[in-house]
Image (cartoon, helix red, strand yellow):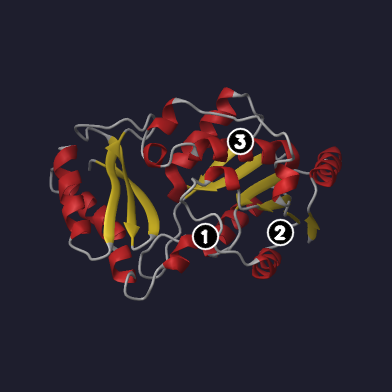
Amino acid sequence: MKIIETVREMQSVADAMRSAGHTIALVPTMGYLHEAHLELMRVGKRHANKLIISIFVNPTQFGPSEDYERYPRDPEGDLEKARSVGVDIVFMPPVEEMYPEGFQTTVKVEKLTQHLCGLSRPGHFDGVTTVVCKLFNITKPHIAIFGQKDYQQLAVISRMAMDLNMDIQIIGVPTVREADGLAMSSRNAYLTQEQRPSALSLKKSLELADEMLRKGETDAKAIVRAVEALIKEHPFTEIDYVSICDPVTLEDMDRIDQEALLALAVKVGHTRLIDNQILKRK
């Protein structure tokens, strides 16, 4: 496994791999790797014969009061885990390599970012699309793998790739959960033992919504009210949003006629958690 820290070397190596006829898969990460990241990498290995991962805590996608400085980091552990699944290259640039002095360009997706996390985290997705666009240009992948837990992020990146005619296949991988049902996230490390049961209210909410739909409830507002009530029953919780929306446009839906996305963002203590599920009428 090769570790690369500079843009110039990474581009040179990617060019050489492409010239040799290799297919490249990229898994972008912010490190502090867990089983969900490793599953993305396994998917990448199945779709390509060269796997690159990036480990970069991207400052431009964090707001002024968010957790950039304290975001969990474990570079040595990350490299050990990457080796365990057969990663070929780890791209680990310092911040000044990705954002040199004078950097002033932003990649922006308009409509999809005006919903869900885009409302409560202004500028977040501009940071995401800008860094992912840069990573695509640096690692030159044929395929890029993202988790469906970050549903809006996956939708935004897919839109960017389509709109900008990027010759890259975007693959979404179903949410990987811990044994108790909590969606895997690096930020789960922030949760105290006392807060953990409250964090599980997100998964319980998805199950409640699915059950209500199975029993014939199609009024989106009624399901949202029930979900909010369930979450509020748990201590330490503060709802950012509960939304039932169109899976493609992310615009709110009044009634579930076919498929709908139920998306949640909830603070448990100081930890912001997200989860989602596609709701389907039976």
**Image quadrant in which the N terminus is located:** bottom right
Furthest-bottom residue in this view: 193
Vertical order, 253 against 199 (above or below): above
- Residue type at numbered disc 2: Val
Residue 24 locus on image (x, y percent): 72, 44
Q: Nearer the viewer, residue 2 or 124?
A: 124
Disc 1 to disc 3: CB gap under 8 Å: no
Q: CA distance from mark 3 to mark 2?
A: 24 Å
For the residue pair 81 and 45, the one nearer the viewer reads as: 81
Within 10 Å of the Cα at label 2, are there few (<14), some (14-19), or many (20+) other Cα atoms? many
Q: Earlier in the sequence, mark 2 or mark 1?
A: 1
Question: Label 1 crowding class (10 Å Cα cut-off): few <14, some 14-19, many 20+?
Answer: many
Lateral position of residue 93 relative to residue 128, left or right: right
Residue 35 locus on image (x, y percent) = 53, 64
**Left or right: 229 in relation to 154:** left
Q: Mark 3 falls on what kind of element?
A: helix
Of callouts 3 and 2, which one flags the residue occurring earlier in the amino acid sequence?
Answer: 2
Q: Residue at x 20, y 58 (%)?
A: 232
Q: Is residue 46 above or below residue 119?
A: below
| Disc marking residue 36 | 1
Q: Is residue 82 left or right of residue 11?
A: left
Q: Taking 45 as reference, is 129 above or below it?
A: above
Residue 235 image point, x, y percent: 23, 66
- In three-dimensional space, the C-alpha distance between marks 2 and 1, rounded to whole angstroms, equals 15 Å
Mark 3 surroundings within 10 Å by alpha-carbon count, few (fewer than 14), some (14 through 19), many (20 or more): many
* Amino acid at pointer 1: Ala
Q: Where does label 3 land, which residue?
A: 130
Disc 1, SS:
helix
Q: Splitting the image into 4 quarters, where does residue 41 fall?
A: bottom right
The amino acid marked with disc number 3 is: Thr
Residue assigned mark 2: 87
Up-down relation of residue 162 to residue 29 (above or below):
above
